[in-house]
Image (cartoon, rainbow, N blue to C red):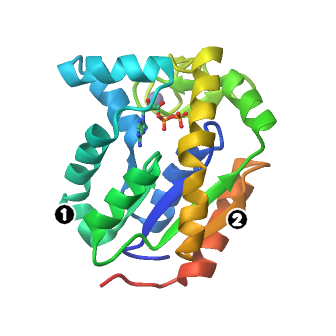
Amino acid sequence: MVPGARLVILGKQGAGKGTQCVRLARHYVVPHISTGDMFRAAVKSRSEFGRKAEEYMRAGELIPDDVVVGVVRERLGQDDTSHRGFILDGYPRTVYQAVQLSVLLSPDDIDLAVDIEVPTEAVLRRLASRRVCVDCGKNYSVDNPPRFDWTCDNCGGEVVQREDDTEAAIMRRLQLYEQATAPLIEWYLEKDRLVAVDGLGHPDHVTQRLIRAIDGRLGPARRHG
Ligand code: ADP
Ligand code: ZN
């Protein structure tokens, strides 16, 4: 347990960030903040902001930095995160976003960035077979479907292929990952705030590796402030 820890989870599309963050949030009892989930909720609400976000997401493009930073600033301003810490999933995705996160948290910073490492060939295979619940966002795959007829085990929602899991959008997201997000690994390494974990294998094993790596770096009972 690391009460109050502030974690950033990095990794390519399909590395398993979403699945693992849900488990880590439960294990450490800290809020899981996924910018992708927040934007998907905005799209579903059909707000004007949601319609704008949808265009970027469908094409696999990044939502403009200033917009994303604003959304994250607002979320991190809420009481739960200042008391209990957070697990950030999908943010930061550019060095600019990482700098803004440091500014937001200053004089502190995040405690640790965890890079879930999976080779590109493997994420391409995973993304092609990925399916997701439209209501709660739970991830499935063609090889690991819900128990009953593409109906979510969690909530009964419909389980479908994500709109941005088309081949073109996947290629674009991976390209942007290499260009804009991969440099963050170096950035956090230089600050001595990075740990890398092998993301291949059974999800349960990956979770165990993550917990071991995080506790190894932060101590099992580290407290914030
Ligand atoms: P993936 O990691 O598979 O791309 P996410 O659910 O993390 O999926 O994000 C989905 C989409 O939401 C992204 O392709 C992008 O358009 C938008 N998005 C999410 N987080 C960010 C961010 N930090 N900066 C810019 N765009 C973002
Ligand atoms: Zn569901």
- Identity of the residue drawn at 48% across and 34% down: 154
Left or right: 134, with 132 as reference point = left
- In depth, the one of 110 and 153 nearer the eye is 110
Q: Mark 2 points at which residue?
A: 209
- In depth, the one of 149 and 206 nearer the eye is 206
| x, y percent for residue 146 | 61, 26
The Cα–Cα distance between marks 2 and 1, rounded to whole angstroms, is 30 Å
Left or right: 210, with 24 as reference point = right
Tell me if mark 2 has few (under 14), some (14-19) or many (20+) residues whose alpha carbon lies within 10 angstroms of its own: some
| x, y percent for residue 7 | 46, 64
Q: Does the residue labelled 1 lie within 8 Å of ligand 1?
A: no
| x, y percent for residue 53 | 33, 24
Tag 2: residue type?
Answer: Arg
Q: Is mark 2 within 8 Å of ligand 1?
A: no
Q: Taking 54 as reference, is 73 above or below it?
A: below
- Identity of the residue drawn at 46% across and 67% down: 28
- Identity of the residue drawn at 57% across and 72% down: 190
Question: To which quarter of the image does residue 132 belong?
Answer: top right
The mark nearer the N terminus, 2 or 1, is 1
| x, y percent for residue 169 | 57, 20
Q: Taking 183 as reference, is 83 above or below it?
A: below
Q: Mark 1 points at which residue?
A: 79
- In depth, the one of 111 and 152 nearer the eye is 111
Q: Can residue 154 be seen in this view?
A: yes
Q: Can residue 157 be seen in this view?
A: no
| Badge 2 element | helix
Quadrant that contains the C terminus? bottom left
Tell me if mark 1 has few (under 14), some (14-19) or many (20+) residues whose alpha carbon lies within 10 angstroms of its own: few
Tag 1: residue type?
Answer: Asp
Q: Residue 70 carries which label?
A: none
